[in-house]
Amino acid sequence: MKAVLTGFLLAATLTLAGCGVAYQQQRSEILKSASAESFGPPPPADYRSIGEAFFKRLLKDPDSAKFEWVVGPRHEAIQPEFASPHAIPVWVTAVRINSKNSFGGYTGFDPFALAWKNGKIVAYTTENTGGGLGFWQNVQ
């Protein structure tokens, strides 16, 4: 039984690693050779206020939020779902957010990023501010 479990875990690890390699290769290719049309139109001019309103819906104390926009709109390719070998071209904006927690204290600035397609937010991540490496949550 232990050998079966070990074999299963090894197979799952190799499968996920393979997806990661395929995704990184596809991401690199998209960023090198995709046409501007592949990314669609850039985010709207008021992307900051739209982004802040989006993140405030996720916070415990939205009125306490302080935003520092660190990366303006730029091309990126992200994974459309966890462990997907595919990459999709999007625009990305990055922000750092400091807000209060349940105890009323500020938590410090944490990095977030928004993925935009055709002028709308399609995904966000809390893991890094670009590089396509974070786990992206799709927005429905």
Image: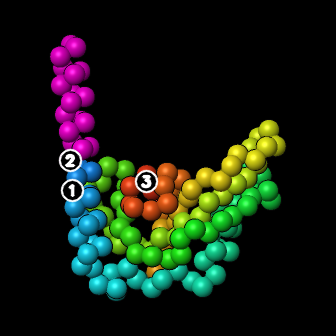
Q: Amino acid at mark 1?
A: Ala
**Helix, strand or loop under label 1:** helix
The first of marks 1 and 3 along the sequence is 1
In the rendered image, residue 54, in percent from the top left (x then y), is placed at 64, 65
Inspect the magenta stretch and tell me whether residue 16 lies in it.
yes
Q: Which residue is mark 2?
A: 18
In the rendered image, residue 46, in percent from the top left (x then y), is placed at 64, 81
- Circle 3: is it few (<14), some (14-19), or many (20+) Cα within 10 Å? some
Report how many numbered discs are placed on residues in the image: 3
Q: Is residue 67 left or right of residue 4?
A: right
Q: Which residue is mark 3?
A: 134
Tell me whether circle 3 and circle 2 mark residues in contact (CB < 8 Å).
Answer: no
Quarter assignment of residue 8: top left
Distance from the alpha carbon under mark 1 to that under mark 3: 16 Å
Is 71 situated above or below 24? below
Tell me whether circle 1 and circle 2 mark residues in contact (CB < 8 Å).
Answer: yes
Q: Amino acid at mark 2?
A: Gly
Q: Which residue is mark 1?
A: 22
Q: Amino acid at mark 3?
A: Gly
User: Which residue shows up at 70% across the image and 46% down it?
Assistant: 107
Front in this rendered view, residue 98 or 55:
98
Is 69 situated above or below 108? below
**Helix, strand or loop under label 2:** helix
The first of marks 3 and 2 along the sequence is 2
Task: Give the farthest residue toward the top.
Answer: 1
User: Which residue shows up at 34% across the image and 85% down it?
Assistant: 36
Bounds of the magenta segment: 1-18
User: Which residue shows up at 19% across the image and 34% down it?
Assistant: 11
Front in this rendered view, residue 72 or 89:
72
Disc ID at residue 70: none
User: Which residue shows up at 74% across the image and 44% down it?
Assistant: 101
